[in-house]
Image (tube, rainbow, N blue to C red):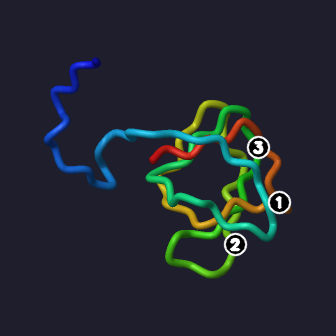
Amino acid sequence: MIHDPFQNASDSPTAPAEDCFAITPDDVAELATAPKAIYVGTGGDVTLVPLHGSAPVTFRNVADSSVLAIRARAIHATGTTATDIVGLA
């Protein structure tokens, strides 16, 4: 069993992620889990819909190994050229 000295700490949007999951951009499907942030392994453009938004927004020229500190409801395939995208939850 792993020792977790923070097991009784409250989770918050600014706390470190406790889970992560691969994201495959999709023009129709929303993410199953709203992430705290988005990790971009291989840079490019990322088109997403903010968690409380309705219109897609494109983050242009995101560098390799970047973390976008934004909560998203969807990552669109159209307009997204970045790859190796991971949701941090």
* Classed neighbour count for the residue bearing mark 2: other residues with Cα under 10 Å, few (<14), some (14–19), many (≥20): some
Q: Position of residue 49 (x, y in %)?
A: 63, 69
To which residue does mark 2 refer? 56
Q: Is residue 77 above or below residue 51?
A: above
Q: CA distance from mark 1 to mark 2?
A: 10 Å
Q: Amino acid at mark 3?
A: Ala
Which amino acid, by three-letter code, is at mark 2? Answer: Pro
Spot the residue most to the bottom: 54
Label 1: few (<14), some (14–19) or many (≥20) C-alpha neighbours in 10 Å: some
Give how far across and how far down residue 68 sits, in percent.
53, 48
**Callout 1: helix, strand or loop?**
loop
Q: Is residue 21 left or right of residue 52?
A: right
State left or right for residue 39 relative to residue 5: right
- For the N terminus, which image quadrant? top left
- Badge 3 marks a residue whose secondary structure is loop
Whole-Å distance between the Cαs marked 1 and 3?
Answer: 9 Å
The residue beneath circle 3 is 82
- The answer to whether marks 1 and 2 mark residues whose Cβ atoms lie closer than 8 Å is yes
Residue type, label 1:
Gly
Q: Report x, y in % for residue 29.
A: 74, 67
Placement of 84 over or under 56, stated as above or below: above
Please report the residue visible at 58 percent of the width from the left and 41 percent of the height from the top. 21
According to the image, label 1 marks what residue? 79
Residue 77 falls left or right of residue 47 = right
The numbered mark at residue 26 is: none
Percent of width and height locating residue 88: 49, 44
Identity of the residue furthest to the right in this view: 78
Residue at (61%, 31%) from the top-left corner?
A: 65
- Which residue is pictured at 16% across the width and 27% down the height? 5
